[in-house]
Image (tube, rainbow, N blue to C red):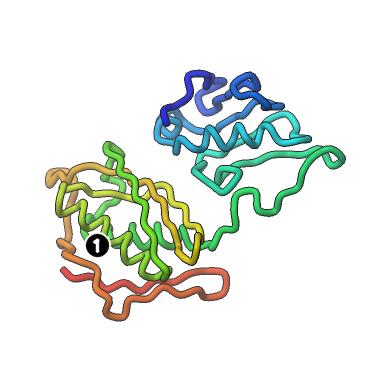
């Protein structure tokens, strides 16, 4: 989905869809982000944040933060204030997060960092979208890391995960992710080793308290 033509620029980092954008909207929808973030934002965000703007009792604006991406009802990063007498309360507005997406991003960055010394040298010039599913959460991480290595081998693409969503559907963990990066440039990307594959030897993803820990051994 392209950026809606009705999206107006309020300032360098504030954008607005007017209440007239979609039938039923009660207030405008405001999205925070630079122009680059807006161009790269998951297209479903615009549909979801305008749905939020249609909720009974919503006050002033439906807001979406710069990390906005596809959620369950609200976009992840969606914010709304409701009138206490006329508004709605939804504890599952953005979905019931299994709270390990950030650990998967950290594990993917760590894998890429084994190959490239400075991750910040990887520019966001190309985009790839992943949709993966697996009954086991640890194998979902395994599949994601293998996907990154596949693009490195097949297209010489060095990718970093910028957006991720994980939901439980029909007994499966379903992952949707957006990766940004560029083709390997030996002049700018100081490489360490070439990772051939992720191994299953001692591979582990476990929850410890409120956090997740991953153990990954790579074949180089």
Please give left or right for residue 54 compared with residue 32 in the image. Answer: right
Please give left or right for residue 27 compared with residue 199 in the image. Answer: right
Please give left or right for residue 100 compared with residue 160 in the image. Answer: right
Dot 1 crowding, Cα within 10 Å, few <14, some 14–19, many 20+: some
Outermost residue toward the left? 186
Please give left or right for residue 153 compared with residue 174 in the image. Answer: left
Outermost residue toward the bottom? 202
Residue in view at x 28 percent, y 49 percent? 159
**The N terminus, quarter of image:** top left
**The C terminus, quarter of image:** bottom left
When the figure is inspected, residue 92 is found, relative to residue 36, above or below; the finding is below
When the figure is inspected, residue 181 is found, relative to residue 111, above or below; the finding is above
Residue in view at x 24 percent, y 73 percent? 199
Residue 106, quarter of the rendered image: bottom left
When the figure is inspected, residue 199 is found, relative to residue 153, above or below; the finding is below
Residue designated by label 1: 114
When the figure is inspected, residue 134 is found, relative to residue 160, above or below; the finding is below
Residue in view at x 53 percent, y 62 percent? 99
Q: Between 143 and 179, which is closer to the camera in this rendering? A: 143
Outermost residue toward the right? 85
Residue 65, quarter of the rendered image: top right
Residue 5 x/y as whole percent: 48, 19
Q: How many marks?
A: 1
Q: Helix or strand or loop: what does disc 1 sit on? A: helix
Outermost residue toward the front? 170
Residue in view at x 68 percent, y 32 percent? 54
Residue 144 x/y as whole percent: 32, 59
Residue 49 x/y as whole percent: 59, 35
Q: Between 57 and 30, which is closer to the camera in this rendering? A: 57
Residue 109 x/y as whole percent: 33, 57
């Amino acid at each position: 989905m392209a950026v809606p033509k009705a999206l107006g620029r309020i300032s360098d980092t504030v954008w607005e869809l007017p209440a007239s954008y979609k039938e039923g909207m009660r207030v405008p929808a405001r999205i925070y982000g630079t122009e680059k973030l807006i161009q790269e934002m998951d297209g479903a965000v615009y549909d979801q944040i305008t749905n939020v703007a249609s909720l009974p009792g919503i006050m002033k604006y439906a807001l979406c933060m710069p990390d906005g991406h596809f959620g369950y009802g609200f976009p992840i990063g969606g914010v709304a204030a409701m009138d206490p007498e006329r508004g709605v309360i939804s504890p599952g507005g953005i979905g019931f997060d299994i709270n390990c997406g950030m650990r998967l991003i950290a594990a993917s960055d760590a894998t890429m960092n084994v190959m490239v010394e400075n991750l910040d040298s990887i520019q966001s010039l190309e985009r790839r979208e992943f949709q993966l599913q697996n009954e086991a959460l640890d194998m979902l991480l395994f599949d994601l890391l293998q996907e990154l290595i596949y693009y490195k081998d097949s297209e010489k693409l060095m990718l970093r995960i910028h957006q991720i969503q994980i939901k439980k559907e029909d007994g499966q963990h379903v992952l949707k992710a957006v990766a940004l990066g560029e083709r390997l440039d030996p002049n700018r990307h100081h490489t360490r080793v070439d990772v051939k594959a992720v191994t299953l030897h001692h591979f582990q993803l476990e929850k410890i308290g409120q956090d997740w820990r991953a153990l990954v051994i790579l074949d180089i």
